[in-house]
Image (cartoon, coloured by chain):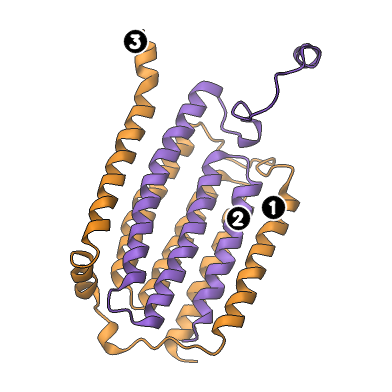
Amino acid sequence: MPLLFPLVVSSALFGIGVYVVLARRHAVLVLMGVELMLNAVNLNLVAFDAWWHDTFDSGQVLALFVIAIAAAEIGLGLAIVLVVFRTHRHVDVDNLRELADRDAPDPERVAGASS
Amino acid sequence: MTTVEVLFVLMGVLAVGSALLVALSTNLVHCALWLVVTLGALAGCYLLLAAEFVAWVQVLIYMGAVVVLLLFALMLTRAPIGRVPDLDGPNRVVAAIAGLATTAMLVVSFVAGFRGTRITVGADDIGSTHAVGATIFGSWVLPFELVSVVLLAALVGAIVLSRRRAAEVAD
């Protein structure tokens, strides 16, 4: 099998993951995009392991580590999403701007926005 | 093309196609279910690349645990069941350009670097779970134990994040 087959598939998956993370507004969908990117990396690791015939099985072992880290990431990410939902009643990442580091708000603009 | 190549192309097309549906579907639950198809097709790819332990771990952890967690999160955040027209933000054109540029860059560099290279999966590669287990608990045992510590930390962190609200309610 040409090595390019899995590499092209993983490139396409990574690009789709980038699109999902950047374009989607729902926080759970953003996490799905991260999962797509991690899976693209896993496919690359396994493909290069099959090509290289590594005696340490580095590619497969690193793919397993990536899966374990992804499980930890998805657990923590969903806990954060649930906390955000409890405090804001929505999980729209485009409207979650409290963590942005910006200057003190202009009083007139705040008054205009609240009226 | 050999049988393995035909199967791999089928699995790859299935994975990329369902990933596109994850990216473009206007129904949140359908996105999660298409993600299952993507992950299953990738498990098939791993099997064809003679990485059967990774394939079954993928089936168990990704298709089993992670997708169930995602569906639970969709339910707990009261995600709308039907179509949601404004699921994409206003910057989807920029996002599409970024995704296409990433894919194009990766494909170009892979073609430049690995054109004509072939993977040969021999008979001794099949059934390599024994070898993978031996290397995990041999050369890789220290990172493996560190991963268990990371998982424990993530578990504790998720519990702390979830319980803070209960303490506030008690106050």
**Could you tell me which chain the residue with mark 1 belongs to?**
B
* Residues indicated by labels 3 and 1 sit on the same polypeptide chain: yes
The residues tagged by marks 3 and 1 sit, at their Cα atoms, a distance apart of 43 Å
The local secondary structure at tag 2 comes to: helix
Q: Is residue B171 visible?
A: yes
The local secondary structure at tag 3 comes to: helix
Indicate the quadrant containing the C terminus of chain A: top left, top right, bottom left or bottom right: top right
Residue matched to label 3: B170
Residues under numbered marks 3 and 2 in contact, where contact means CB atoms less than 8 Å apart: no
Q: Residue at x 34, y 15 (%)?
A: B167
Q: Is residue B16 above or below residue A103?
A: below
Q: Quadrant of residue B159?
A: top left
**Could you tell me which chain the residue with mark 3 belongs to?**
B
Q: Position of residue B170 (x, y in %)?
A: 34, 10
Residue matched to label 1: B95
Q: Position of residue B120 (x, y in %)?
A: 39, 88
Q: How many marks?
A: 3
Q: Amino acid at mark 2?
A: Val
Mark 3: few/some/many CA within 10 Å (<14, 14-19, 20+): few
Q: Position of residue B10 (x, y in %)?
A: 51, 77
Q: Is residue B96 above or below residue B56?
A: above
Q: Is residue B76 visible?
A: no
Residues under numbered marks 2 and 1 in contact, where contact means CB atoms less than 8 Å apart: yes
Q: Residue at x 41, y 82 (%)?
A: A51
The residues tagged by marks 2 and 1 sit, at their Cα atoms, a distance apart of 7 Å
Q: Amino acid at mark 1?
A: Ala
Residue matched to label 2: A18
For the residue pair B115 and B74, the one nearer the viewer reads as: B115
